[in-house]
């Protein structure tokens, strides 16, 4: 049953599974999907919860909880990251797996959606403890992953080292090296050139396409980026190189602002030296919540879910919202942004550069033949531009906003695959 606005609590609005389900229901209704197909597409195909006993460095044994959800394998193996965080929940992992299904369909690559997570506080664990957690988690989910079944990748608080541990653990169980079991690996272990920049590059490419609709050029376009990790940092670096004025960076501990544009490379060096973006000599420190509401041309949330909600959406002052993070906007905020005329590049399009180059990595691993960086970037550019045109074309054809268009396009493609395959009985 769809939750109505009148009965919606704050907890329900920021529940990512509620957001994913609401948007699914709305798109399915507009597409006219029959009830049977809605039942198939609305539920994950598999949910796995595992207990992970680990001996800590001080000799104590702790048991961590891990999840792996496969939402759909109709169009190919499940694909999706693994995050380590204290607030990981099954609802969050479900939603992220569903978003991966729709994201892969939007950019038309042959994957379904998966996601995983372990409840832990990585910043309080040593590298050796994280390795033991990763390897035991991999062993617990080992029979459910693989190049033909489910291909994990890095996500929040995981990285190429985490992927190397997963690849090695899986390979030891298979008794031969299986590089294609994960993506986002170190180059030396079968990673792809262009992968670290891919999500940020995809955000830049789709933003460049959106600028054409506002007769804007990068040199006069003011950008605010929330999050300065891999996605936000790379987007800021690439956008600055392309001529954009990145005027504000927002992080968990504050924000920095320069109306003439920030020196992103200098800010990266400052953070590396001090551990924070605060106190950067070439910018002024500003309140992080107010920074999100500053006047700009492009707002790029690139951190976690639920940054833009019904509580602040009416005060967003951007022409273009490019969603570098997964689920940064709640579904109640969608209507407010639409009424304000904000051009939204939805997450399942905007940040799909990462999974697209992950697909390239998977292909290269399976071929045993690796591409140069120019080839990776050219093919990424082609897919992102084509996908942007597909979504905006669908939006115009069906008279819906970009998010609904992206969902409708994705549902249409996945439902088509299921119909053509039929139901095994």
Image (tube, rainbow, N blue to C red):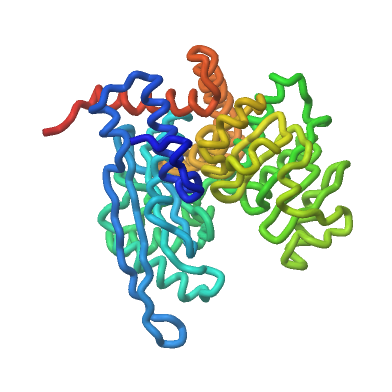
Residue at image coords 27%, 27%: 37
Residue at image coords 53%, 32%: 349
Residue at image coords 66%, 24%: 341
Above-or-below relation of 306 to 24: below
Above-or-below relation of 132 to 281: below
Residue 104 in view of the camera? no
Where does the image place residue 247, in percent across and percent down from the top left?
80, 43
Residue 267 in view of the camera? yes
In the rendered view of the protein, which quadrant contains the N terminus?
Answer: top left
* Residue located farthest toward the front when viewing the structure as drawn: 6
* Residue located farthest toward the top when viewing the structure as drawn: 397
Relative horizontal placement of residue 149, taking residue 191 as reference (left or right): left
Where does the image place residue 402, in percent across and percent down from the top left?
55, 25
Where does the image place residue 88, in percent across and percent down from the top left?
44, 58
Residue at image coords 51%, 62%: 161
Where does the image place residue 83, in percent across and percent down from the top left?
47, 57
Relative horizontal placement of residue 129, taking residue 293 as reference (left or right): left
């Amino acid at each position: 049953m769809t939750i109505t606005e009148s009965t919606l609590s704050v907890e329900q609005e920021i529940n990512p599974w509620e957001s994913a389900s609401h948007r699914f229901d709305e798109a399915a209704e507009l597409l006219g999907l029959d009830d049977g197909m809605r039942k198939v597409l609305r539920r994950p195909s598999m949910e796995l919860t595992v207990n992970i006993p680990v001996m800590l460095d001080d000799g104590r044994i702790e048991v961590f909880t891990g999840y792996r959800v496969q939402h759909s394998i109709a169009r190919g193996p499940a694909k999706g990251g693994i995050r380590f965080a204290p607030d990981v929940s099954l609802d969050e992992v479900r939603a992220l797996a569903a978003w991966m299904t729709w994201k892969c369909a939007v950019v038309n690559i042959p994957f379904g959606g998966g996601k995983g997570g372990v409840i832990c506080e990585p910043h309080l664990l040593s590298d050796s403890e994280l390795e033991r957690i990763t390897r035991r988690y991999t062993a617990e989910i080992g029979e459910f992953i693989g190049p033909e079944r489910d291909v994990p990748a890095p996500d929040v608080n995981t990285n190429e080292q985490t992927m190397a541990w997963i690849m090695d653990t899986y390979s030891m169980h298979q008794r031969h090296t299986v590089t294609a079991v994960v993506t986002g690996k170190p180059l030396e272990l079968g990673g792809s050139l262009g992968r670290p920049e891919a999500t940020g590059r995809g955000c830049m490419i789709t933003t460049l396409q959106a600028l054409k609709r506002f007769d804007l050029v990068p040199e006069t376009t003011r950008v605010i980026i929330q999050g300065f990790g891999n996605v936000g940092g790379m987007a800021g670096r690439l956008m600055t190189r392309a001529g954009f004025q990145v005027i504000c960076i927002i992080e968990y501990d504050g924000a920095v602002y320069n109306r003439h544009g920030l020196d992103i490379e200098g800010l990266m060096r400052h953070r590396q030296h001090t551990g924070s973006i605060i106190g950067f000599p070439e910018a002024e420190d500003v309140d992080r919540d107010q920074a999100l509401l500053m006047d700009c041309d492009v707002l790029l949330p690139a951190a976690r879910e639920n940054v833009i909600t019904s509580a602040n959406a009416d005060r967003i002052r951007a022409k273009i919202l490019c969603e570098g993070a997964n689920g940064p906007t709640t579904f109640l905020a969608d209507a407010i942004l639409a009424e304000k005329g904000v051009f939204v590049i939805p997450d399942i399009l905007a940040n799909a550069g990462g999974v697209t180059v992950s697909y390239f990595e998977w292909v290269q691993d399976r071929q045993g033949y690796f591409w140069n960086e120019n080839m990776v970037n050219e093919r990424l550019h082609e897919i992102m531009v084509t996908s942007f045109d597909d979504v905006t074309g669908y939006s115009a054809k069906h008279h819906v906003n970009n998010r609904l268009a992206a969902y409708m396009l994705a549902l249409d493609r996945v439902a088509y695959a299921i119909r053509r395959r039929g139901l095994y009985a």
